[in-house]
Image: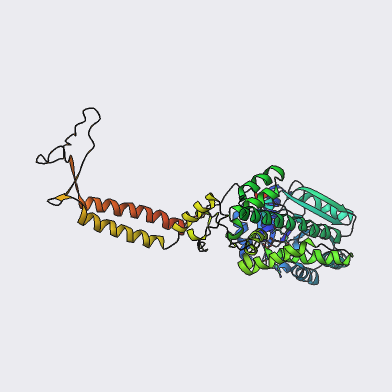
Amino acid sequence: MAPTLLWVGLGNMGRGMCRNIVEKGQLDSPLLIYNRSTERAEDLSSKLPVGKTEVVDSLAAAVPRADVIFTCVADDEAVRELFRAMLEDDDVKGKLFVDCSTIHPESTEAIARDVLASGAEFVAAPVFGAPAAAEAGQLIGVLAGPRASVDRAKPWFSGVMARTDIDLGGQPCGRASTLKVLGNTFVFNMVEQLAEAHVVAEKSGLGTHAVHQFVEALFPGPYAAYSTRMLTGDYHKRREPLFAVGLARKDARHAKNIAAAAGASIKTLELADAHFAMVREHCGESGDIAGIYGAARQEAGLKFENDAYFLQQRPPHQPLPKLSVASRTSSTSALECRWTIIFAMAQWYSIFIGLAVIVVLCVASWFLAPKGQNQVFVIPFPTPATGQSRRPYSAPTDVPLTTAAYRLWRSSLILSIVSCFLMWAITFLAQLNPLIVPKRSDLREKFLEH
Ligand SMILES: NC(=O)c1ccc[n+]([C@@H]2O[C@H](COP(=O)([O-])OP(=O)(O)OC[C@H]3O[C@@H](n4cnc5c(N)ncnc54)[C@H](OP(=O)(O)O)[C@@H]3O)[C@@H](O)[C@H]2O)c1
């Protein structure tokens, strides 16, 4: 009989991890799911096959029913709070707790001690990989703790939630957290490097596309994926970050602290962390670590948001970037300038400019159109065969063939102009406030690692 599982924490990561457990894990009973705000649990449950999950609204009710309890929440304080709640009331003897959150190794060790003292088992299992990798079951799990406990947890990692595991079985739980935090510094430095290179490429006239091509050729995978996120403007358009800058700052703090405790330092982190602070200030809670690009741009005298702005990808709540043709700098490439002009045309007030133009055209049509008895005559092209103009069936017989062939009421002209405007206006407004926000499918986010 397969153990009953409880999952606690349904943020960006937890949701994808649960989906894979439900789809690929061995379960004889529904996966119990809990989240501090219950709506997230209900929402996830409604998207998974019926009967595969059961939403629980209290840990006190759920923990006694579970054999294995996974946790994946934001930070050290959240993990400590959860474990205090789970351990204080219930008899947890024999249960296995698996924590997938990224926290400081000392927090991990303290929690492991409390769990073991309650007669349960504990495995630290932080994961590498972005939310898309969690969704695709392509994470990299780092598992540490007593050998037997790690072996008990492994069936839900490689092949289910993860594409591979780093097995630190038999080593102190805190080691998994140390590796996870250190691993994240690689990601931060990668993003920092990309951001700076793109800024220099833009300002020097080389152009960001050349750098992107180089990155794709030499560093495919996460480098290329982050480069794409920068150049497509994904770094400033997301409502929900893929890797929240707040979580990244927590990891940077932990990494600096681990290094200092070991008598070493990670100097490159200072730069990334200063940029994280700028991203947080500019974007607030929704800031993503790829926003380092925006911070580096600001430092170089550019706008935080780049001009590679695809209207159809813009979340409805965000205003269009303020752009103008005059903002072109000597280093702006022709392509970027073309985008600038397009987006200047795409400001919300373009609809009124368009309306004014149409009114002027209609008035001009009414008064200036050549007419005889309220009619506008359109001079035809000669027919190719004879060089003579043809008299269409509708043309009045008193009109000489050489001057007009058919008649057009000027009101028809005005109606055509108005119809064109309406068609454009409807399309334009649909882009400003799309009912459906299309998502790019070619960002290859599953290759992002952090
Ligand atoms: N995002 C990534 O790319 C990534 C990659 C690898 C590892 N990680 C790590 O995985 C963990 C989860 O990340 P995430 O991206 O899923 O975060 P997230 O989307 O911000 O979700 C955070 C989760 O923690 C819960 N939570 C926060 N404070 C809590 C508290 N005091 N008590 C109970 N629950 C609390 C939230 O509940 P509510 O829904 O009620 O707010 C939510 O379920 C973090 O430790 C992160 O560092 C993240």
**Is residue 21 visible in this depiction of the protein?**
yes
Placement of 441 over or under 71, stated as above or below: above
Q: Classify residue 363 as left or right of residue 303.
A: left
Percent of width and height locating residue 325: 48, 58
Q: Tell me, what colour scheme is on the image?
A: rainbow
Q: Quadrant of ligand 1?
A: bottom right
Question: Which of 8 and 216 lies nearest the eye of the viewer?
Answer: 216
Percent of width and height locating residue 83: 78, 68
Q: Classify residue 235 as left or right of residue 88.
A: left
Residue reaching furthest to the front: 330
Percent of width and height locating residue 190: 73, 54
**Is residue 324 visible in this depiction of the protein?**
no
Question: Which of 310 and 202 lies nearest the eye of the viewer?
Answer: 202
Residue reaching furthest to the top: 385
On the rendered image, what quadrant is the C terminus found in?
bottom right
Placement of 400 over or under 315, stated as above or below: above
**Residue 277 quadrant:** bottom right
Percent of width and height locating residue 310: 52, 53
- Number of numbered markers: 0
Residue in the image at 80% along x and 49% along y: 165
Question: Which of 137 and 64 lies nearest the eye of the viewer?
Answer: 137
